[in-house]
Amino acid sequence: MKQHKKFFGSDGLEYALSEPPLKKRVTVSFQKYWLIYLLILPGVVSLIVFAYGPMLLQFIMSFTDYRLIDGIFGSDWVWFANFKSLFTELPEIGRLITNTLVISFYYFIAGFFPSLVLAVMLFDLSSSKLRKVSQTIVYIPYFFSWVIVYGICYGLLSNTGILNSIITGLGGKRVDFLLNANYIRTILVVTYIWKQVGWGTIIYLAAMLSIDVTLYDVAKLDGCGPIRRTFVITLPGIKNITVFLLVLALGGILNGGNTEQILLFYSPATWSKADTIGTWMYREGLRNPDQFSVAAALSFLQATIGMMLVLISNKLSTKYAKISIW
């Protein structure tokens, strides 16, 4: 069945333009651009095999009593027993959820506001050379692996580190910063900011470059200072990218921050404050064959809630801010 589009001609009258059926348009597109589709085929196949394939297998595993010898499809189907056992047979689930939410909230604040503030400060610098040098300096830590970052922190905060050497030199007592649960979250957040703030700054700076510079000139003529210009021009000008990053950050609120980082920094002495869903799944779910199914169920539940948060956040953004990420 042909589709019709309405348009107005130069005479002001309304006309209908017929379009070929969707099936025919798809066929013509494949015939015309078959080489391009052939080039993107390996990428599509790899995405299905290495991204969506494991997601499907994890979904199936979460409903089975997985046994390594039987495989995923040969294991007994237990339906929602694994999800039930998460809240009835896992005593630390309350601690895991609490730590995950608290650390995720800290990471959300640390990953959102420092980058935005630093980007605004760099953008307002009058010297382009100083801006480039400062941007390079804050961006360098992003290329460090978390192993290197932990090595730096260990050299600073260990019992024989620089900070404890200064404390003992001044007559104080050594402090086990890395083995003290009261300090672990602060260490995680500070190192996360130091490593990631450069990347977020580049994203915001790229968005700021699209703002019309004549707006700033007009604002200066009207007597607007730097702070006033930030709130009336800069922040509204990057509203789209800010909302986009905000929605994605809210969707990852149950990820518990950076699991790779926490695995390097935490220890049994700090589990009470730093053990999250991600670290538990690695420590128990991947190393203990009896917990494979339970870990898969927990991961699936985490991903489902994250997807729901993204959808809800995007819906609220569309309704109130008139901005949507799709």
Image: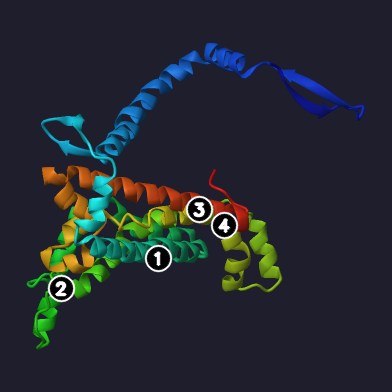
Q: Residue at x 25, y 46 (%)?
A: 81
Sequence-first disc among 4 and 3: 4
Q: How many marks?
A: 4
Q: Residue at x 28, y 40 (%)?
A: 79
Pointers 2 and 3 in contact (C-beta within 8 Å): no
Sequence-first disc among 2 and 1: 1
Between marks 1 and 4 in the image, the one whose residue lies nearer the viewer:
1
Sequence-first disc among 1 and 3: 1
Horizontal side, residue 272 vs residue 125: left or right: left
Sequence-first disc among 1 and 4: 1
> Can the viewer see residue 144?
no
Q: Residues within 10 Å of mark 1 (few under 14, many from 20)?
A: some
Q: Residues within 10 Å of mark 3 (few under 14, many from 20)?
A: some
Identified by mark 4, the residue type is: Lys
Q: Which mark is residue 312?
A: 3
Q: Nearer the viewer, residue 108 or 255?
A: 255
Q: Residues within 10 Å of mark 4 (few under 14, many from 20)?
A: few
Label 4: which secondary element: helix
Q: Which mark is residue 239?
A: 4
Q: Which residue is mark 2?
A: 180
Label 1: which secondary element: helix
Horizontal side, residue 190 vs residue 271: left or right: right
Estimate the spatial distance between the alpha carbons at disc 4 and disc 2, rounded to whole Å. 40 Å
